[in-house]
Amino acid sequence: MKRATAEAGERNVFELGTEARRRLFAQVIDLIEEHNAGVRDLPATPDVAPETVRRHLERYDFADALEPGQVLDDAAAMLRDWIVHTTHPGYFGLFNPNPAVMGVLGDLLTAAFNPQLAAWSHAPAAAEIERHVLGFLGRRLGLPGEPVAGHFTSGGAEANLTGVLLALTRAYPRIGEDGIAALPGHPVFYASAESHLAWLKIAHMCGLGRRAVRLVPVTNDLRMDTRALTALIAADREQGLLPFLVVGTAGTTSAGVIDPLVDLADIAAAERLRFHVDAAWAGAAALSDRLRPVLDGIERADSVTLDAHKWLSMPMGAGTFLTPDAEGLLETFRISTAYMPAEIPGAVDPYAASAQWSRRAIGLKLFVALAAAGRTGYAQMIEHQAGLGDELRRRLLDTGWRILNDTPLPVVCFSEPTSDAARLRTICDRVLSTGRAWISVTTIAGTPALRACVTNFATTEADLDTLVAELDLARS
Ligand SMILES: Cc1ncc(COP(=O)(O)O)c(C=O)c1O
């Protein structure tokens, strides 16, 4: 690779000159456009060993300045050849989105202006943009508070961690100062056996230990068994444990199933427990008037996780944490320092109400995307994809597959009438090796399954045809 030219070299290498900058911005736009135009013909899945990538990277010893245009070309080539393309229309994957163009542009603006969202006074525009967008999401979910409290997060795991910390702080006001050891027992919380297992990491990070997560069995429809939940709470209390939180999952990761949120809200209220809803991906359904009822009960949550980098098609990472409990959030992350700018009356400093300190303005990309598409634009996309999910289910049934989950959301879990995990893995690998589609294997309620999810706005009925055809070949 060439060393940097005199033009780039003689100037500050971090700033470059106006001409060089314009050329490089244009080059990146061309690289992105080229990628978008050609991604359908790229293999959705890379076939590469770690050594290949590492060998390639050895050329970068960072000793001298290299020609910036060539560096960008090479970075794009690595991305083209060596990642799973979530932008591929045949990516029936794990909610990793094809990012909306406005989201990408919003992210670029954010990177260039680089607002610091630790303190409100450092970035009033960015802070108020986020507050405005969160308010909109809160109203769609029906959460009390005008606007609802909360913040953007790196993703769903951070938002769920925040949910546990807030619930702990509210349930045991002493915990913030004295820690768990000061409590008269060990706190435990409840999520379904089909929930996202970041709960285990979160329990460890909070000092509760993984055993504090009580994974409640599910009924045949894969929703949390509420009778088992109440029995478990009673048994735990009997043993001197301290139940403090019920988590409902609105859209399980594997099967897209929504826990009985109204019942869970009732149980949490009766048992005097906090209620968090993990709607990391399916919370987006709140933007559709037609699909909003599938989330009924979410409006009673003490806090909600809703990721914009899943079904709202934002570039990663863009999670949100929403809660009517503004005071609780301030208490959970309470801090003040001499070196941070002074508080502004009527404004919340994000560093004192969330887990992160210095923080990127995550919400700006969602703001511009929402403004440009409108809620109705999002609703159309979400409803269209739910329809494609139904269509895929029909086509799989017609071609002899067995459907294993029942959900209004576009996640389809399926298998052959008789097949074990190894056989499904083989079928999945064969499909991936064609490069024309990306699906995965999972286990739901102990049963192995293939899984295909439609949350990519570029996916069409023709891509369903391709997937079904490749599945047919793979099992023959
Ligand atoms: C239901 C659910 N919750 C939480 C998460 C974790 O979100 P993230 O990967 O953004 O941290 C996921 C990820 O797929 C999820 O499906």
Image: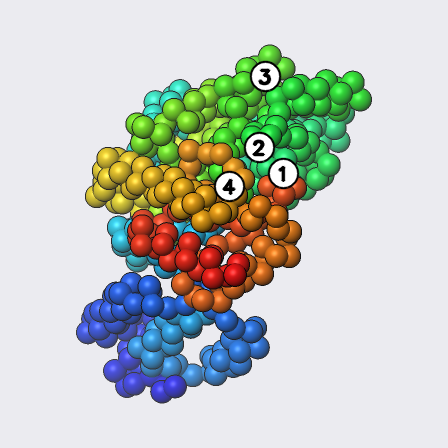
Q: Report the mark closest to the observer, 1 or 4.
A: 4
- Asked whether the beta carbons under mark 3 and mark 4 sit within 8 Å of each other, the answer is no
Q: Mark 1 points at which residue?
A: 445
The CA span between labels 1 and 4 is 14 Å
Q: Mark 2 points at which residue?
A: 222
Colouring method of the image:
rainbow
Relative side of 463 to 61, left or right: left
Query: Would you identify the image quadrant in which residue 78 lies?
Result: bottom left
Q: Earlier in the sequence, mark 4 or mark 2?
A: 2
The CA span between labels 2 and 1 is 7 Å
Q: Nearer the viewer, residue 253 or 55?
A: 253
SS at circle 4: strand
Q: Mark 3 points at which residue?
A: 267
Q: Report the mark closest to the observer, 1 or 3.
A: 1
The CA span between labels 3 and 4 is 31 Å
Q: Pointer 3: residues within 10 angstroms few (<14), some, or many (20+)?
A: some
Cβ of mark 2 under 8 A from ligand 1:
no
Q: Pointer 1: residues within 10 angstroms few (<14), some, or many (20+)?
A: some
The residue positioned 54% from the left and 40% from the top of the image is 404
Which three-letter amino acid code belongs to the residue tagged 4? Answer: Ile
- Considering the image in quadrants, where does the N terminus appear? bottom left
The residue positioned 49% from the left and 67% from the top of the image is 433
- Asked whether the beta carbons under mark 2 and mark 1 sit within 8 Å of each other, the answer is yes
Q: Which of 449 and 323 is in front in this view?
A: 449
Q: Mark 4 points at which residue?
A: 403
